[in-house]
């Protein structure tokens, strides 16, 4: 066009530090306005430049910071088409001012917000005096527009290339081909701007450069800023024509959807009690559905970080609780001492011939009573997880704090009520066991069938080497000279613990029989993020090569507990409490 507007800031470093959304609107007169100071008309475009710089600093500060908050500028002129341009920051890999080292990622994310839109044409601007094959602009454009349908390449600073080099192969669309091709331009230098060289003189100098340069003169008519203007107008018009039908269809469907939604509110009365009741019922019903899903499973938002809800309760019942029951195993010497005293005390001054039933019942009852504590603790853990689940499900009621508070109060009160009933029932069951020892029960091992049951158990254990668990574990105590901590594929059976190079189980590294093995806790290392436990031989033998312990590590505490529960099923019991005890309440 006959007149060229010059108002975008220029300078060294990152000049564009916020997106500039520039709406060009055809009008009879020439003026501009910013949305952040609407109503104020700018007729002097030097003032427009100053306002862009000032508004940039208002949000980003004067320390060369960046911000994704756009500056919205409207320019009205007889010399423009009706279209919108967005000027974005260029990628930089160097921290600027007080900015952090991740400034490159911040700018990249900001650019992506805009160039992902299918309705946008992408102007990928790359300086010719850099490595064009590694152009960030072209890489980003290719990420969002792999077919090159929306990308136009612009090569700048052709006059600053090293002597004897040129960008001819790129401009002829041979080196890094784009469907829409490349256009070379030569802009004013900072020296030209400081010297007040006007744009007309700059355009004349640009034209002369292309006509006289031996590498570009044969394509001079398809190079330069005026040709870029012409191509952009033409390609933008074509792009609008191609995308408009789908865009119109999308807008119409959105409009219909909004109309349907709005219809519900046309007769809306804020104080309508029926509407309030309906909304309340829907929210409470949603809370109920969410709670059920979290406990029963099949939730719409599955936690991939840790166990929660029903899964955690399942683990409490099937791993934590049995593990704690096994840890209650009494010391055999202590048991024998107690039995001896019980028998003597019941006989009194008499010398007894047979073991009295009263001594047997006294010892058994003392053992049964020990079950109370882990049972009650198990209930406590389950209740705590139920209350956590209630809080997670009530997150959707955040907009109504009183409703959320009341919902949590009612449900938690109900859970607490059921907690006391559950504890009463569990204690009653234990009291039932204490009240009467049924020696006729088929599971009771009396003197008559003790030997028979024992031999049956031995036959059962040798019947088959059943696989109990498989999974990855890290052996932590391999010396650094031998490669250091390393991950292996472990297979636990009823008789042995083996590990392999990988889960194909082709290359077995070692097989450890389970006889005389026990599990010991290992405190988490300060330097390691993993959780550990150890396996050792009760007969003071080396359990693996020259190691007294086999120290194993998992990523989470849950995995450690799960492995320990599996080892428990295989008959590998935890070390005696008092030596290294992990209580039920410590996790």
Image (cartoon, helix red, strand yellow):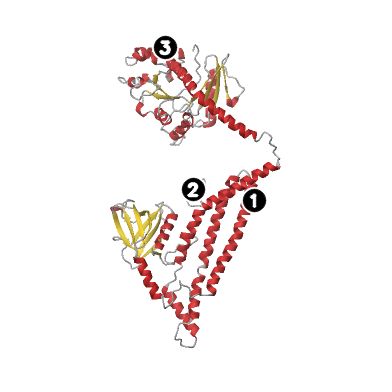
C-alpha span from label 3 to label 2? 64 Å
Asked if the residue under mark 1 is in contact with the one under mark 2, i.e. CB atoms within 8 Å, the reply is no
Q: Residue at x 40, y 65 (%)?
A: 573
Please say if 416 is above or below 452: above
Q: Residue at x 33, y 67 (%)?
A: 540
Q: Residue at x 49, y 11 (%)?
A: 2
Q: Which residue is mark 1?
A: 406
Q: Which residue is mark 3?
A: 204
Q: Position of residue 381 (x, y in %)?
A: 53, 59
Are there few (<14), some (14-19), or many (20+) residues within 10 Å of tag 3? Answer: few
Are there few (<14), some (14-19), or many (20+) residues within 10 Å of tag 2? Answer: few
C-alpha span from label 2 to label 1? 26 Å
Asked if the residue under mark 3 is in contact with the one under mark 1, i.e. CB atoms within 8 Å, the reply is no
Q: Tally the numbered discs.
A: 3
Q: Residue at x 38, y 63 (%)?
A: 570
- Disc 1 or 3, which lies upstream in sequence? 3
The foreground one among 83 and 433 is 433
- Disc 3 or 2, which lies upstream in sequence? 3
Q: Which residue is mark 2?
A: 303
């Amino acid at each position: 066009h006959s007149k060229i507007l010059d108002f975008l800031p220029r300078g060294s470093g990152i000049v564009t530090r916020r997106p500039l959304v520039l709406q060009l609107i055809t009008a009879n007169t020439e003026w501009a306005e910013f949305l952040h100071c609407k109503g104020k008309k700018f007729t002097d475009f030097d003032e427009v430049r100053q306002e862009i710089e000032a508004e940039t600093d208002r949000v980003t500060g004067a320390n060369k910071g960046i911000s994704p908050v756009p500056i919205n500028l409207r320019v009205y002129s007889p010399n423009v088409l009706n279209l919108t341009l967005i000027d974005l920051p260029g990628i930089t890999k160097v921290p600027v001012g007080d900015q952090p080292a991740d400034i490159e990622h911040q700018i990249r994310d900001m650019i992506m917000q805009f160039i992902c839109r299918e309705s946008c044409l992408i102007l990928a601007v790359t300086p010719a005096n850099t490595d064009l094959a590694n152009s960030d602009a072209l890489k980003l454009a290719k990420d969002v527009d792999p077919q090159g349908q929306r990308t136009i390449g612009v090569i700048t600073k052709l006059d600053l290339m090293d002597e004897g080099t040129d960008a001819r192969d790129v401009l002829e669309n041979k080196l890094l081909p784009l469907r829409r091709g490349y256009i070379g331009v030569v802009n004013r230098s900072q020296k030209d701007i400081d010297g007040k060289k006007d744009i007309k003189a700059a355009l004349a100098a640009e034209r002369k450069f292309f006509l006289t340069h031996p590498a570009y003169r044969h394509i001079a008519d398809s190079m330069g800023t005026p040709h870029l203007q012409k191509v952009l107008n033409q390609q933008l018009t074509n792009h609008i024509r191609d995308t408009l039908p789908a865009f119109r269809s999308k807008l119409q469907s959105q409009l219909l959807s909004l109309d349907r939604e709005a219809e519900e509110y046309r007769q809306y009365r804020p104080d309508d009690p029926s509407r309030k009741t309906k909304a309340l019922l829907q929210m409470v019903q949603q809370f109920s559905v969410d709670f059920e899903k979290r406990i029963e499973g099949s939730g719409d938002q599955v936690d991939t970080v840790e166990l929660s809800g029903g899964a955690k309760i399942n683990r409490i019942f099937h791993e934590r609780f049995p593990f704690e029951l096994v840890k209650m195993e009494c010391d055999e010497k202590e048991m024998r001492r107690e039995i001896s005293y019980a028998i003597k005390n019941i006989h009194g001054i008499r010398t007894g011939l047979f073991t009295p039933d009263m001594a047997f019942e006294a010892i058994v009852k003392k053992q049964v009573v020990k079950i109370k504590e882990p049972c009650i603790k198990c209930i406590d853990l389950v209740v705590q997880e139920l209350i956590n689940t209630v809080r997670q499900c009530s997150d959707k009621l955040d907009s109504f704090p009183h409703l959320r508070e009341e919902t949590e109060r009612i449900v938690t009160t109900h859970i607490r009520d059921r907690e006391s009933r559950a504890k009463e029932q569990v204690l009653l069951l234990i009291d039932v066991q204490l009240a009467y020892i049924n020696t006729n029960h088929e599971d009771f091992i009396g003197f008559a069938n003790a030997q028979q049951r024992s031999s049956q158990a031995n036959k059962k254990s040798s019947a088959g080497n059943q696989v109990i668990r498989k999974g990855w574990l890290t052996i932590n105590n391999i010396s650094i000279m031998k490669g250091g901590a390393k991950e292996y594929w472990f297979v636990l059976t009823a008789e042995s613990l083996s590990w392999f190079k990988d889960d194909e189980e082709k290359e077995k590294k070692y097989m450890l029989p389970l006889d005389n093995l026990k599990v010991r806790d290992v405190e988490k290392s300060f330097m390691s993020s993993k959780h550990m436990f150890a396996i050792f031989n009760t007969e003071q033998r080396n359990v693996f090569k020259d190691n007294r312990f086999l120290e194993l590590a998992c990523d989470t505490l849950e995995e450690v507990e799960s492995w320990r529960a599996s080892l428990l099923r295989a008959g590998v019991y935890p070390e005696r409490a008092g030596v290294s005890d992990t209580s039920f309440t410590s996790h």
